[in-house]
Image (cartoon, helix red, strand yellow):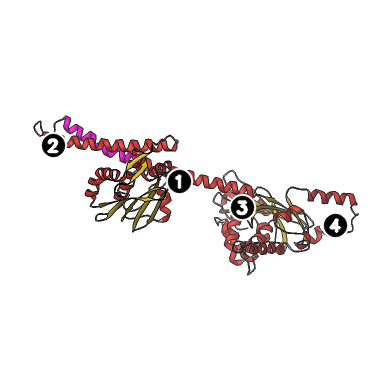
Amino acid sequence: MARVDPRYALFADLLDSLSIGFCLFDGDDRTLLWNRMFLALFPEHDGYVFAGEPYAENLRRFYAVRLGPEELPLIERYVAEGVARHRAQLRPFTFQHRDAWVRVTSMPTPEGGRLRLWTQLPAQDDAGAAARAPAAPASDASARARAAFIENLADGVMILDPAETIIALNAEILALYDIPSRHQVVGRSFAEFVARVAARAAALGEGATFGEDWRLTVTERHRFRGAAFEVQLPRQRWVQVIANRAADGVAYSIHTDITEQKRQQAALARARDEADRASRAKSDFLATMSHELRTPLNAIINFAEMIRDRMHGPEIAHRYVEYAGIINESGRMLLDHVNELLDVARAEAGKIEIEPEVLDARTMADECLKLLGREAEKRGVAIVLDVAPPAMGVRADRRALQQILRNLLSNALKFTRQGGQVGLSFAIEPGGARVTVVDTGIGMRPQDVAVALQPFGRVRNDVNVAEAGTGLGLPLAKHLVELHGGTFTIESEAGKGTRVSFTLPG
């Protein structure tokens, strides 16, 4: 054998005397050590395998001599599945290679690697001699008992002869694979059975999923007897298959319906992804919130110290009045952030209560313009109001409507560049009123809208990296609208602007 790490030299000499193929891999699936029997069983590796070679390269050579022209394009998929089988193997399995049957055992090493052993099984002709010799006929009673046992198993059972021809199966197989009767598959090869399943999928309109690649992959997986594998079936069903081969070449396979298990796994994966998303969103929120709170707090502390220490002398009172105004504005900003947090917490707990009343739409619009007019002027953005008819009333909770409008207009101003425009309109429609906030800002991609509506969700773009915002305004506004029994919709296009519209039942 090729000499590898000197630490294994004595061990290697011992292994060369065995009639069992041996290969040792480290925790990164790199080849460490192999013996002569391994090369005898797999001559494609002789002169090519080397210490440190990834197991995937080993498999690539294995499949290169094993696959025909029809399957060769799938070699990378087979290699990936082989590596996964290597890492997860818990029990021996058998397969045929170069006209010989081989049983492979794999076990983990304390260092995290894998030890694989290959044993060549007796030639099928010799092993099957006893099976072909005349045998005492089984009694009718024992034959019926065996047939009844197979038929009443909860899982599907399929039996194949050494030539891969189906010789028996039970009713559960017919149900799992949607086959009307036994005579359609008994006497057919396993490859023909798989092709029939693919044809049935095509008839159901699922031919794209169950095409040639699927057929070849399932057939290849079935060649490794004892290695469990999963098969996707039409109509979103799944089975797990495990087959074993007896000494006479007859194969027995068990087919278990794992559809519900796969659904639960998918649900868990979705829940895990959602939890990860929520965790990332909250981490982003905490980082943002720390900045949002620190900025006004620093202003309050610094300007309060200036007033306390009379930094400009006792005579310059107008400067201290200006500082007091900054402190007041910063304090109100802090209070707004705290109130927003409390409102979101109350909303998630279902503890927000509203008291609708008839409000004058124009008055509500003017109040919002008074609150945000200075901000719009500072940004160079025009706010256009449209209330039709001018004296229309809307039925809503005053504080809740103020918060909805303030949140939506603040967002619109924040993401509209200088020279842009933000519009606020109230209109009567059957059953109530429609309120719309539209801007000519940077907009969002369709997939970003869902993010913006999630608590703590912040859409990544060039503008909001430097902009303030907690990611709570839109989801809170939506929740308050829905408390009124209204609907909340967002239409947005990146680079063109956003339209947020909600209804208030009358």
User: Which part of the image, by quadrant, shows the C terminus?
Assistant: top left
Reading the image, the residue beneath label 2 is: 319
User: What is the three-letter code of the residue carrying label 3?
Assistant: His
Taking depth in this image into account, of 326 and 433 the one nearest to the observer is 433
> Where is 196 relative to 317, above or below?
below
In the rendered structure, are the residues bearing label 1 and label 3 in contact, judged by CB atoms less than 8 Å apart? Answer: no
User: What is the three-letter code of the residue carrying label 1?
Assistant: Arg
Reading the image, the residue beneath label 1 is: 277
Side of 474 relative to 135 (left or right): left
Report the Cα–Cα distance between label 1 and label 2.
47 Å
Q: Residues within 10 Å of mark 4 (few under 14, many from 20)?
A: few
The kind of secondary structure the magenta stretch mainly shows is: helix
N-terminal label among 1 and 2: 1
Q: Could you tell me residue 188's position as x and y percent?
A: 76, 64
The label on residue 165 is: none
Is residue 161 at least partly visible in the picture?
no
Stretch of the chain drawn in magenta: 289-311
The label on residue 86 is: 3
Eye-nearest disc, 4 or 2? 2
Reading the image, the residue beneath label 4 is: 130
Q: Could you tell me residue 177's position as x and y percent?
A: 70, 57
Report the Cα–Cα distance between label 2 and label 3.
76 Å
Identify the residue at image location x=76%, y=53%.
171
